[in-house]
Amino acid sequence: MGRNIAIDLGTASVLVYVEGEGIVIREPSVVAVNRNEKKVLAVGTEANRMIGRTSGEIIAVRPLRDGVIADFEVTEAMLRYFIRAALRHRSTLWGKPSKAVICVPCGVTEVEKRSVEMVARRAGVRDAFIAEEPMAAALGAGLPVGQPIGSMVVDIGGGTTEMAVISLSGVVVSESLRIAGDRMDEVIVAHARKKYSLAMGEKTAEEVKIAIGTAMPPRSNERFEVRGRSLKNGLPVTVYFTARDAYEALGDIVQKIIECIRNLLEETPPEIMGDILHGGITLTGGGALLRDLDIAINRETGIPVYIAQHPLDCVALGAGMMLSSISSYCVSRSRRDTTR
Ligand code: ADP
Ligand code: MG
């Protein structure tokens, strides 16, 4: 019998967890596709490497970018690739994985979830289950989800921000927002264009965000050197993008996330509010690492805010923890989707 696996099929990255082993795969959710024939050429890290180094015939597709499946065929190819990669991993070599828990963004429809299960089975998994992402995030963050205590988790990924209040292994209330890390990159690009007439790529914008992005007024005058093309005369130009610029660009997004948290708090039953006030809000996903985001949320809600220990790994770790008690966590065929 083989080992069980868990997959976090994220909008920005895919993580694969192998039971008894931990996270063994961590790659971008990118697929390289031939523009004309729509043929899948490479997946993950390898796909990323191909982009920009070819004739332009090859394009990068992020099939889950906005938290919905934009192209099922490409998503299927990606999932198959990662399951096969997990199968090739040494700890699963002595047999097929018998069970797989797969986390997909909340915007994925019921029909698509069933198709994802089918794809997983065709790729060599005996039993595939789809789990709710916020539940996996909360479990992976170490929150007491199985207890009669309300916990609140906010997962900020690439394409979506998903948040939920959880108690007794169930989602009590949840909210989902199509604003997260990618949108942060986009507003940095827009800010560079407007203020410095600079054409900045999204990859560079992500670097800027990670280096100096902040949700609170910056305390220092840190800056990030960006080389790009001037939109005025098309010539190469160097611009110093400051932490203040990043703060100004990101402000609206931070406010939208806080607004969504407020809505969720309003929907939260009063008997659970006390638990949240006490236990706080836990941030997971890559966006949780945006500097001072925890402070900004705390300032505006008055609730303590914690960043999970390994925010990028929570969903995969939580999905892995679900392997041993699938019936209590996974959305089975008969259960209603409570996230939308
Ligand atoms: P998903 O689950 O949707 O695949 P992740 O949880 O992997 O997404 O988070 C990816 C997002 O987190 C990206 O937008 C990335 O730029 C962002 N991110 C990663 N590290 C940081 C950081 N230190 N500061 C701000 N954002 C970050
Ligand atoms: Mg995620």
Image (tube, rainbow, N blue to C red):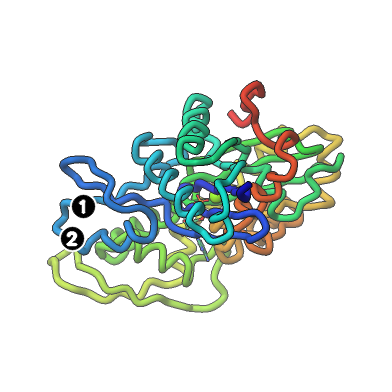
Residue 7 at least partly seen: yes
Disc 2 element: loop
Cα gap from disc 2 to disc 1, whole angstroms = 7 Å
Whether tag 2 and tag 1 are in contact, CB under 8 A, the answer is yes
* Outermost top residue: 334
In terms of depth relative to the viewer, which is nearer, 323 or 193? Answer: 323
Residue 200 position (above or below residue 176): below
In terms of depth relative to the viewer, which is nearer, 57 or 174? Answer: 57
Q: Which residue is mark 1?
A: 58
In terms of depth relative to the viewer, which is nearer, 70 or 340? Answer: 70
Q: Which residue is mark 2?
A: 54
- Residue 166 is left or right of residue 247, and the answer is right
Badge 1 amino acid: Ile
Q: Position of residue 91 (x, y in %)?
A: 58, 59
Q: Position of residue 168 (x, y in %)?
A: 81, 37
In terms of depth relative to the viewer, which is nearer, 294 or 48? Answer: 48
- Badge 2: residue crowd in 10 Å (few <14, some 14–19, many ≥20): few
Q: How many marks?
A: 2
Residue 293: name its quadrant: bottom right
